[in-house]
Image (cartoon, rainbow, N blue to C red):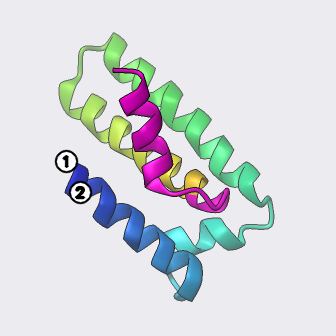
Amino acid sequence: MDDTLDELFAVIEDRKETLPEGSYTASLFTHEKGENAVLEKLGEETTELILAAKDDDEEEIAYEAADIVYHLLVLLSMKDMEIEDLEAELEARR
């Protein structure tokens, strides 16, 4: 999974730099609400994950968890953090 997250974060960082037209990721970096747009999405996706878990819907749980991870990585990029910052914190909690 590390490779998947590293690759996804690299794509996010690329979208942040190049801001390709039509890219959802790029739109988050240029949204008029700024980082609030991503924070709102994290809240929304968290609520959807909780509801999926309550319903024992494994497919929906995986889908919403992926949305949370994606938006979390976008937030890290917005804050000029690296995925290694997240990995180091998780390692410290082992």
Task: Measuring from the top left, give residue 53's x and y in whole percent.
Answer: 33, 17
In the picture of the structure, the residue carrying the numbered disc 1 is: 1
Q: Secondary structure at mark 1?
A: loop
Q: Range of the magenta residues? A: 77-94
In the rendering, at what x and y percent does residue 48 appear? 45, 29
Residue drawn at (55%, 88%) of the image: 18
Is the Cβ of the residue at disc 1 closer than 8 Å to that at disc 2? yes
Residue that label 2 marks: 4
Say whether residue 89 is visible.
yes
Main SS type for the magenta part?
Answer: helix
The picture quadrant where one finds residue 44 is top right
The x, y position of residue 3, in whole percent, is: 21, 58
Viewer-side residue, 90 vs 56: 90
Is residue 19 visible to us here? no
The amino acid sitting under disc 2 is Thr
Q: CA distance from mark 1 to mark 2?
A: 5 Å
Q: Residue at x 47, y 34 (%)?
A: 89
67 to the left or right of 42: left
In the displayed structure, 80 sits above or below 90; it is below
Q: Residue at x 70, y 73 (%)?
A: 30
* Along the line of sight, the residue nearer the viewer: 74 or 37: 74
Above or below residue 84? Residue 61 is above
- Callout 2 crowding tier (Cα within 10 Å): few <14, some 14–19, many ≥20: few
Residue 2 lies in the magenta stretch: no
Q: Is residue 3 above or below residue 23?
A: above
SS state under label 2: helix
Q: Position of residue 57 (x, y in %)?
A: 23, 22
User: Closer to the camera, 90 or 74?
Assistant: 90
Residue located 36% across and 31% down the image: 91
